[in-house]
C-alpha cells in the first residue's frame, strides 16, 4: 500500500516562503516587494498560496484516510472549515482593531479599513452580522472565507480527484469559466465585495488537489519528449516577465485578479511546472533542509497568515505615515526586516507557547 506522509518538506518550504512574500507584498513601501513574483509575472503569490492550499489539503486527506477511513477525513475537514471560519472572525476583528488603533494615533493610511470601522460605529449589530455571514470581509481577512468553502468541498473533490480526475478538472474549468456571472449569488453587504471570487479561484485549489493525487507530472517528465513541456513553461514565464517589465508594467488587478483571469492562470501554470521541476531535481528539498525557519512558517500556516495580516497592516500604515507615501529605501528595508523577523519568530515560538498553555490547562 502506498504511504502518504503527513508533512512534505518542500511543501512546507514553499508555503512558508509564500506567506513571507504575502506579508512584504502588502507593505506599500517595502523594498523586497519590488522583486517578488508580482513584479515580473501576470500572477502573484495568491495563486501559489491557493494552489499549495489544495495540494496540502489533499496530502492531509490522503494521510487521514490511510490511517483511518475516508469518513475520518471528511469529519476532519468539516472541523477544519470551522477552524478557518473562526480564523476569519479573528482576522476580521484584528483588521478593525488595528485600523482603530492607527486612526486613534492620527495615522491615516490607504489600507486601513476605515469604511467598515465607520459602519461598525453607526450600525454595530448590522456590521457584525454581515461579518458573521461573510457579507463583509475586512481587508486581508478576505481570502479566508473561500478557504472555508474549499474545506467543506473536500469530501466532494477528493473522491473525484482520486478516481475520476479529468471529470473534476473539467467541472472546475467550467465553473471557472462562468465565475463572473456566478459571482452575483455570493452574499454581500452594500458597497462590499469578495476580493477573491471562490467560483474562479477553486480552479487552482482543485488542480492542486488533483496534482497531489495523480502522477500526471511524473508521466509527462518520464516521456522522452517531456523536457519540451518544461521548455515551453520556461518560454511562457520569460515572455510574461518581459511583457510585465517592458510593455505593460502595471497589469490590471481588480476584476482580473478577483475572477482569476486567464492570463494569470496561464502564467501561473508555467511557473508551477517549473516549480515542480525544482522538486524533481531535489533543489527545493535542498533549500528546505537549509531553511528550517521558513519551513516552520509553512507548518503554522493559519497562525502565520493571521499574524502576517496584522504585521503587514501595521507596518504599511506606520511606514506610510512616516514617509508621506513616498519611497524611502532605508525605512523600506527596515520594514521588511521587521516583518520577516516577526513572522519567523512567531512561527518559532508557536510550538513552545502551545505546549506551555497545554501544560497549564492540564
Image (cartoon, helix red, strand yellow):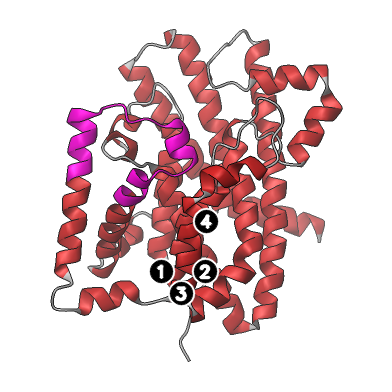
The answer to whether mark 1 and mark 2 are in CB contact below 8 A is yes
Q: Secondary structure at mark 1?
A: helix
* Distance in Å between CA atoms under marks 4 and 1: 19 Å
Seen from the viewer's position, the closer of residues 203 and 63 is 203
x 21%, y 31%: residue: 245
* Distance in Å between CA atoms under marks 4 and 2: 20 Å
Q: Which residue is mark 2?
A: 58
Closer to the camera: disc 4 or disc 2? 4
The overriding secondary structure of the stretch rendered in magenta is: helix
The reply to whether residue 161 is in sight is yes
x 45%, y 50%: residue: 49
Position above or below: 121 against 17: above
x 40%, y 64%: residue: 9
Closer to the camera: disc 4 or disc 1? 4
Neighbour tally class for label 3: few under 14, some 14-19, many 20 plus, Cα within 10 Å: many
Q: Which residue is mark 3?
A: 165
Neighbour tally class for label 4: few under 14, some 14-19, many 20 plus, Cα within 10 Å: some
Neighbour tally class for label 1: few under 14, some 14-19, many 20 plus, Cα within 10 Å: some
Label at residue 211? 1
Position of residue 84 measured from the top left corner of the image (x, y, whole percent): 66, 51
Q: Earlier in the sequence, mark 4 or mark 1?
A: 4
Seen from the viewer's position, the closer of residues 345 and 52 is 52
Residue 125 left/right relative to 108 = right
Q: Earlier in the sequence, mark 4 or mark 2?
A: 2
Seen from the viewer's position, the closer of residues 302 and 242 is 242
x 77%, y 22%: residue: 120
* Distance in Å between CA atoms under marks 4 and 3: 15 Å
Q: Earlier in the sequence, mark 1 or mark 3?
A: 3
Amino acid at each position: 500500500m502506498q504511504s502518504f506522509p503527513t508533512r512534505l518538506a518542500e511543501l512546507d518550504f514553499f508555503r512558508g516562503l509564500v506567506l513571507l512574500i504575502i506579508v512584504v507584498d502588502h507593505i506599500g513601501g517595502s523594498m523586497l516587494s519590488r522583486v517578488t513574483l508580482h513584479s515580473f509575472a501576470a500572477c502573484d503569490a495568491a495563486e501559489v498560496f491557493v494552489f499549495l492550499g489544495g495540494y496540502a489539503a489533499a496530502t492531509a486527506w490522503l494521510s487521514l484516510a490511510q490511517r483511518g477511513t475516508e469518513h475520518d477525513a471528511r469529519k476532519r475537514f468539516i472541523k477544519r472549515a470551522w477552524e478557518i471560519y473562526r480564523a476569519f472572525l479573528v482576522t476580521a476583528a484584528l483588521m478593525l482593531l488595528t485600523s482603530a488603533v492607527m486612526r486613534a494615533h492620527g495615522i491615516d493610511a490607504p489600507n486601513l479599513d476605515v469604511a467598515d470601522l465607520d459602519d461598525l460605529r453607526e450600525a454595530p449589530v448590522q456590521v457584525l452580522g454581515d461579518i458573521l455571514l461573510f457579507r463583509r470581509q475586512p481587508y486581508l481577512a478576505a481570502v479566508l472565507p473561500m478557504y472555508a468553502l474549499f474545506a467543506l468541498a473536500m469530501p466532494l473533490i477528493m473522491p473525484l480527484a482520486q478516481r475520476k480526475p479529468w471529470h473534476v478538472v473539467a467541472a472546475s474549468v467550467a465553473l471557472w469559466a462562468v465565475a463572473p456571472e456566478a459571482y452575483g449569488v455570493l452574499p454581500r453587504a452594500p458597497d462590499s465585495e469578495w476580493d477573491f471570487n471562490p467560483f474562479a479561484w477553486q480552479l487552482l485549489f482543485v488542480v492542486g488537489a488533483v496534482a497531489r493525487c495523480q502522477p500526471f507530472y511524473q508521466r509527462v517528465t518520464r516521456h522522452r519528449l517531456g523536457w519540451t513541456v518544461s521548455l515551453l513553461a520556461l518560454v511562457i514565464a520569460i515572455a510574461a516577465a518581459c511583457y510585465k517589465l517592458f510593455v505593460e508594467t502595471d497589469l490590471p488587478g481588480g476584476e482580473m485578479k478577483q475572477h482569476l483571469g486567464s492570463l494569470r492562470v496561464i502564467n501561473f501554470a508555467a511557473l508551477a511546472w517549473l516549480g515542480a521541476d525544482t522538486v524533481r531535481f531535489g533543489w527545493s528539498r535542498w533549500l528546505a533542509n537549509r531553511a528550517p525557519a521558513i519551513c516552520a512558517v509553512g507548518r503554522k500556516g493559519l497562525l502565520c497568515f493571521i499574524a502576517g495580516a496584522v504585521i503587514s497592516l501595521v507596518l504599511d500604515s506606520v511606514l506610510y505615515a512616516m514617509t508621506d507615501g513616498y519611497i524611502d529605501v532605508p525605512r523600506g528595508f527596515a520594514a521588511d526586516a521587521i516583518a520577516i523577523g516577526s513572522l519567523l519568530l512567531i512561527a518559532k515560538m508557536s510550538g513552545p507557547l502551545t505546549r506551555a498553555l497545554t501544560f497549564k490547562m492540564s
